[in-house]
Amino acid sequence: MSHKTISLPSAISLVITSMIGVGVFTSVGFQLGSFPTGFPIMMLWVVGGIVSLCGALCYAELVAMMPRSGGEYHILREAYHPIAGFLAGWVAVTAGFAAPIAGIAMVFGKYVNSLGLSAPPLGIAATLIIVIAVLHFGSLRLIGGFLTATTFLKVSLILTFIIGALCMKGGQGASLAPQAGDWKMIASPGFATSLVYVMFAYLGWNGAAYVAGEVRDPQRNIPLAFLLGILFVMVLYIALNAVFLWLAPWDAMRGQVDAALIAAKAIFGERGGWWMGALIAFGIISTTASFTWAGSRVNQRMGQDIARLGFLRKVNRHDAPHIALLLQTVIALVLLFSGTFDQVINYLMCLLQVSAMLAVLAVVILRWRRPEAERPFRTPLYPLPPIVFTAASLWILVFQFQKYPEAFLWSIVTLAIGLGLYLLTNKKSQA
């Protein structure tokens, strides 16, 4: 049993640093390709924050009720069936953590290379993955302190950028107020498909659920970590995108993955672009650390429940699940050098949304099946939060299926492989 060494500040830092990655710095360029005015783009970030907050309120009730590490794996296992939990864990192991770690690390390699380090981007990316993994073999207290410190520095840099940009003269001065036709665009299929990328930027809002078993006083601290972390990131995202849209040239940013760098150069000059690249690279370090931490705990939790995967539950003298960490690191490195990890992320984003939606619906199911269970935290305004999150998820999934049907095909293949693995391990466990 792991010692409960994660404090409230560390849990909040995990939520914040899990969300603030590369998504917020790359999305605006593609959003400008879909919307000619600023108000719908700002509403994307507002809606994404509200949906994430609704999901977090539901997760908070579930984790306070069942404070064990594992995230969706643990929740779906308890609310539905061990098969549902296993499949959620399978998705988390293959796509939820290892693939994003690989993808984020590749972006890190490219940014660091562009900042002047003359080394192969893939080599830089692999070094980051390995160094972060080695760090997680150490003390939980050290990791928590690392996340808290890097989160503080990352947020400080973003706030400095926002304040500095607002103090600058000039810029485009584009209006972000509603204009004719904006509400029609917000109700369009394009808004739903664009929301996929915004939800990717908010991905990680449930980060504290994966390490709940290691948080001090989880009934109190997990809900607080969710609420405070998401509200803070939501405000930060809205402010940052308002600066991009208000001051930077839209034509130059439209359709560009490095829209944030373009905006920084337009606002601060070439040197500002360099610092923006450094900010993103620095932020990726802590995001990689948080994904590494949370993902390894899903692997560990599966090892605790499935006899044939028992090797994943082993811990070292620092209570770190070293074999689970090693497995996740190997998968991330394989995806990194395969050149297909970005496709894996696209194919399985719909599975991550379905997994989170089923976890949110578990609040309704468990209130019906276990009305007598102790609930230290109850979802405010129930049943509105699960309704909002579920409706938004279905809205996104329907239009995502229409635009990217191949993603659903590969998702079904992935689930089929996971189901076969479950039946194999379950059969051997009973033998």
Image (spheres, rainbow, N blue to C red):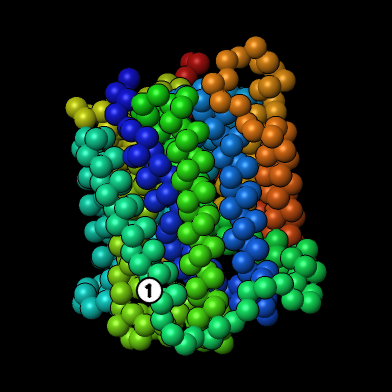
Q: Is residue 84 left or right of residue 239?
A: right
Q: Which residue lies furthest to the top in this view?
A: 372
Q: What element carries label 1?
A: helix
Where residue 88 sits: x, y (%)? 55, 37
- Which class describes the residues within 10 Å of circle 1: few (<14), some (14-19), or many (20+)? few
Q: Vertical placement of 135 versus 431: above or below?
A: below
Q: Residue at x 31, y 78 (%)?
A: 274
Q: Which residue is drawn at 21% across and 30% down?
A: 318
Asked if residue 362 shows in the view, the reply is: no
| Residue at x-position 48% and y-position 59% | 236
Q: Foreground: 354 or 94? A: 354
Residue 148 on image: x %, y % = 30, 46
- In the figure, 419 relative to 15: above or below? above
Between 335 and 38, the residue placed more toward the observer is: 38
Percent x, y of residue 146: 25, 46
The quadrant of the picture occupied by the N terminus is top left
Residue highlighted by disc 1: 164
Q: Which one is in front, 67 or 268? A: 268
Residue 157 sits above or below residue 204 on the image: below
Q: In the rendered view, does 120 fall on the left or right side of 425?
A: left
Residue 314 lies left or right of residue 138; in this view the side is: right
Callout 1 amino acid: Gly
Question: Residue 147: in sight, yes or no?
Answer: yes
Residue occupying the point 26% across, 35% down: 140
Residue 347 left/right relative to 117: right
